Amino acid sequence: MGTSRTGAAGAAPRIQVSRTGRVASAPRMGMSPLPLDEIIVGDCIAALERLPPQSVDLVFADPPYNLQLEGTLVRPDNSVVDAVDDDWDKFASFQAYDAFTRAWLLAVRRVMKKDATLWVIGSYHNIFRVGASLQDLGYWILNDVVWRKANPMPNFRGKRFTNAHETLIWASRGADSKGYTFHYDALKAGNEDLQMRSDWFIPLCTGEERLKDANGQKVHPTQKPEALLARVLLSASNPGDVVLDPFFGTGTTGAVAKRLGRHFIGIERDSTYAAAARARIAGVTPLEGDAIAAAPDKRSEPRVPFLSLVESGLVRPGEALLDDRRRHRAVVRPDGTLALGPAIGSIHKIGALAQGLPACNGWTFWHAERAGSLVLIDDYRAKIRAQMGAAA
Amino acid sequence: MGTSRTGAAGAAPRIQVSRTGRVASAPRMGMSPLPLDEIIVGDCIAALERLPPQSVDLVFADPPYNLQLEGTLVRPDNSVVDAVDDDWDKFASFQAYDAFTRAWLLAVRRVMKKDATLWVIGSYHNIFRVGASLQDLGYWILNDVVWRKANPMPNFRGKRFTNAHETLIWASRGADSKGYTFHYDALKAGNEDLQMRSDWFIPLCTGEERLKDANGQKVHPTQKPEALLARVLLSASNPGDVVLDPFFGTGTTGAVAKRLGRHFIGIERDSTYAAAARARIAGVTPLEGDAIAAAPDKRSEPRVPFLSLVESGLVRPGEALLDDRRRHRAVVRPDGTLALGPAIGSIHKIGALAQGLPACNGWTFWHAERAGSLVLIDDYRAKIRAQMGAAA
DNA sequence: TGCTAGACTGAATCGTAGT
DNA sequence: CACTACGATTCAGTCTAGC
């Protein structure tokens, strides 16, 4: 599988795990354990094949961009990683790059939990091939996201537009994996109470954040900004989740994961990069629990039956509920249903019926009258939830 | 590809050319003449094969996106989204879509002059496949360009990021076609002397520009804004050039070409669309020579998410924000939300909560403590805006 | 005529838990 | 697995009706 710079002796690639790391217990009998918060030095695909299936929650991949393609037409070369020569970013042909891409995408897919999602970043040199391969393998694209660079490299020769963005693809394991993590409410709250869009404006990785070697040279040519990874992890993972990065490089994913209270698994075949990553991550201090704790999102709050409001006395049987303009009126029944004329049903059904609509959220439609003004029953629901929380 | 509504008699697709158009002399003996400023009604690939080789200077293509929509999407107000469900956007499989894509890309490539360039627009549903096919066929990608929509449709279910952009690929005929047209200086002058970037901020096609039928219904479901086409034509073509659009639709390419003093050739298989395009273009008045200039990006004040302040390091997760009299204190979370006791929300929501008010502008309420004194976060926003403004 | 409130719209792959 | 009920969810703009 190509030349590795790990220096591991012998023909078969051996997975190396640094000595300080924890190792999770194997989720299934006979499987190798999950090396949490570790950097595996070795070939990406071989290492992936040794991980237990369905074991990670999120994948972030920054694969080689295939920047130095030569020629236009493909050569008759079906070999996979043999086509990778000493330059890690040089592939003999589109075919070889596609074969490589499909191989790691397949290997990654095996270790993803059912509702895990995958992020891949790339530029126009490679992202179209990655995206097409993703779709071919059954991944389901959720969004493409544009990283707009604040300070891109200008186009010196004036022959093209300034290449001011890169593209990320966010995909689930398949069209039926609908339970993926997405912190809609938190993202909206952090964005002026507007939905987060698919175009993100984030500066390049420069200054102190950029890793330099003893000579002041940058350690890795394409180190990604931590802000980018932070937005990815905050969008699509929870504290305690396992985040896999099969092209770990200098460990931006690991550093951000540690800071945000996520576990990481990094795979990197270049031991120089891996060493730099290990030192970098060791210096990261995790944020305190309160700062990291998942923001509440409405969908995961406990369900409260409307009957509980009646039972607790917040709403009285026999009283009328009204919409915000007092155009509709329904009577509360002791069993937690509403009556509108002859019709009886849930707060939602009766709300829909009153408006002549197919559906309605009764919690945000009906109000109780208190001292001449209207109180939304959703506010009463919040009270009940607060009591439930205090009791728990 | 599919049924044609041209109504042309006979089995073989016949190319129809409207009677008012000019026809260029054939560039080579034995070839059919070039139908300038005409709409060819018929199958795209058949029509392309009848055009002389190496005869057009620029191609703009807006192919079907293969959206793969299922079911209906309902807005929170219970209205139904008018989705693209036309037959022309339905394909049996990715394979079928790829075959279609390669066929038209090949046919287009034959009619391109050596230094002609091609633009294709698409979304994440199709653009990766288009890009990969482009590369496979020998096209050479010059840029990918992101059309950032000023007013995209929101994500109504809160399950994904707002799909706020589409992608254009700009490619030359091959890696050796280096003489392509690119108006670097004109674009730079029209962009406040900054190099034109690969991310363009342009509103959707709405209002008077959007073609409506006698019933007030939109004529075409995916009409593109003229501002987008204008930027394409101004950047990559010269007055007098021949611009080909193989998926002409309602003729945005033709209208902009005529206005900017370029010739067009449109191919459209739907005669209703073609008729609407013909009428539209007839009403276009060409601009006088000097008036032809690039429109700069709309420079509306960019919106800054509070999250950007956290990401840029101006405000640190875990630190406290204070009001001007230090009476209230909230903790910054890494996702750009604030925490006040158990409550988590946007800077505005938490500011309102702290004061017991219904609303609050968090930007002018919260301060960070720096060297013992307070800095209004609105001042930090101004810093970010300066970066974004430079990048717009 | 001018203003405002409300309706309408845009290339969209847009549920989930419980029985 | 199928079925049912719950109940969560929208931004920037244009256009129309009504005052």
Image (spheres, coloured by chain):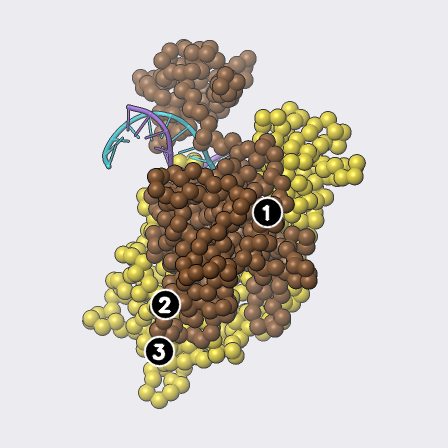
Chain colours: A brown, B yellow, C purple, D cyan
Q: Which residue is mark 1?
A: A281
Mark 3, chain letter? B
**Residue A79 numbered mark, or none:** 2
> Of all residues shown, which one is farthest toward the front?
A9
Give coordinates of residue A198: x percent, y percent: 50, 49
Q: Residue at x 49, y 54 (%)?
A: A41
Element at badge 3?
Answer: loop
Q: Nearer the viewer, mark 3 or mark 1?
A: 1
Q: Please identify the residue farthest to the left as the structure is shown.
A: B10
Identify the disc placed on residue B51.
3
Mark 3 to mark 1 CA distance (whole Å): 61 Å
**Residue B126 x %, y %:** 39, 58
The residue sitting at 22% across, 72% down in the picture is B12
Kind of residue at disc 3: Leu
Q: Chain of mark 2?
A: A
Q: Secondary structure at mark 1?
A: helix
Instruction: Check if mark 1's residue and mark 2's residue have beta carbons within 8 Å.
Output: no
Q: State whether residue A32 appears in this view.
A: yes
Left or right of A283: which side holds A267?
left
When the figure is inspected, residue B293 is found, relative to residue A54, above or below; the finding is below
